[in-house]
Amino acid sequence: LHLSHFCGAPTALKIIKNLEKYREAAKLEINVLEKIREKDPHSKHLCVQMLDWFNYYGHVCISFELLALSTFDFLKVNNFLPYPINQIRHMAYQICHAVNFLHDNKLTHTDLKPENILFVNSDYTLVYNAEKKHDEKRLKDTRVRLIDFGSATFDHEHHSVVISTRHYRAPEVILELGWSHPCDVWSIGCILFEYYEGFTLFQTHDNKEHLAMMERIQGPIPQRMIHRSRKQKYFCHGRLDWTESSKAGRYVNAKCKPLRRYLLSKGAEHLQFFDLLERMLEYEPSKRITLSSALRHPFFRPLFHSIRFML
């Protein structure tokens, strides 16, 4: 929902249902948004700006700058055709930049997914794809903003056991090992894969099947994580209790393959991209690349001379 001239400019309005539990959640989100506005008044770190909030007959209403389609919705209207690698590079840098800002301010987003990354402008041109013999939509502007801080959690706050939308959920969350900033990095890895291929990396709704997919793509789960896990029901003798010949096992084998086999090209920029993905999809949170390091990865080198103009 948006109001055409709220606060003098096109404005998006988030309206929270008039129920106590939702009002309490809205107060927590407003607290996060106020912190973001205080630390970044000029939106240099690409998190959506809250303009104001008010109570309307028990409905908490939060007004924001008006943005365009989400990165998921653009994929959808483009028939799930992948984004070009140069556009992924710019989008990925911005996402890492925004979430790194949150981590620097002791916040974990906890619900990163393509739906929560919005384009500033989703206008496009039609480009003819000679190989596929049809037109495809090509974005004119790949500037993005990070949205939805309803689940964002400060380091000192209570950490819920289950976080993140299923397909972007890190292994330490599934195994109930506790979580912190690295869980956002895992989610970003899943998002970037989706931009590159046009489909979800982990297409499942079951924890054990999700872990089996991880093993098919990234190899065995480390023993240290298995031994520490509160979810021993998923394991037998230190290994995932999984039968490849079962119906579920055949599904995982058909749906998943080792990560490098998803490469669409052997070109240098594609190889650099997959090196970054592998570091983001590292099982051990302590070994997973940090976003401050990710921002210096060679994949982003083509942006370094111009990035201050592109953010």
Image (cartoon, rainbow, N blue to C red):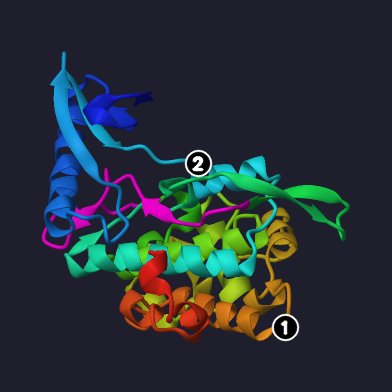
Location of mark 1 (residue): 266
Query: Going 45% across and 81% down the picture, which residue do you hit?
Result: 222
* Residue 154 higher or lower than 151, as above or below: below
Residue type highlighted by circle 1 = Lys
Q: Position of residue 200 (x, y in %)?
A: 60, 55
Q: Is residue 90 left or right of residue 85?
A: left
Location of mark 2 (residue): 69
Residue type highlighted by circle 2 = Leu
Q: Quadrant of residue 295?
A: bottom left
Main SS class of the magenta portion in the image: loop
Q: Is residue 193 visible?
A: yes
Question: Which residues, given as a range, are shown in magenta?
Answer: 139-163
Res. 309 mark:
none
* Residue 279 higher or lower than 83, as above or below: below
Q: Is residue 50 left or right of residue 202?
A: left
Query: Going 22% across and 29% down the picture, which residue do you hit?
Result: 7
Tell me the quarter of the image containing the N terminus.
top left
Mark 1 or mark 2, whichever is nearer to me: 2
Tell me the quarter of the image containing the C terminus.
bottom left
Q: Quadrant of residue 170?
A: bottom left
Q: Secondary structure at mark 2?
A: loop
The local crowd at label 2, few if under 14, some if 14 to 19, many if 20 or more residues have their Cα within 10 Å, is some
Q: Are marks 1 and 2 in contact (CB under 8 Å)?
A: no
Q: Nearer the viewer, residue 285 or 51?
A: 51
Q: Is residue 219 left or right of residue 44?
A: right
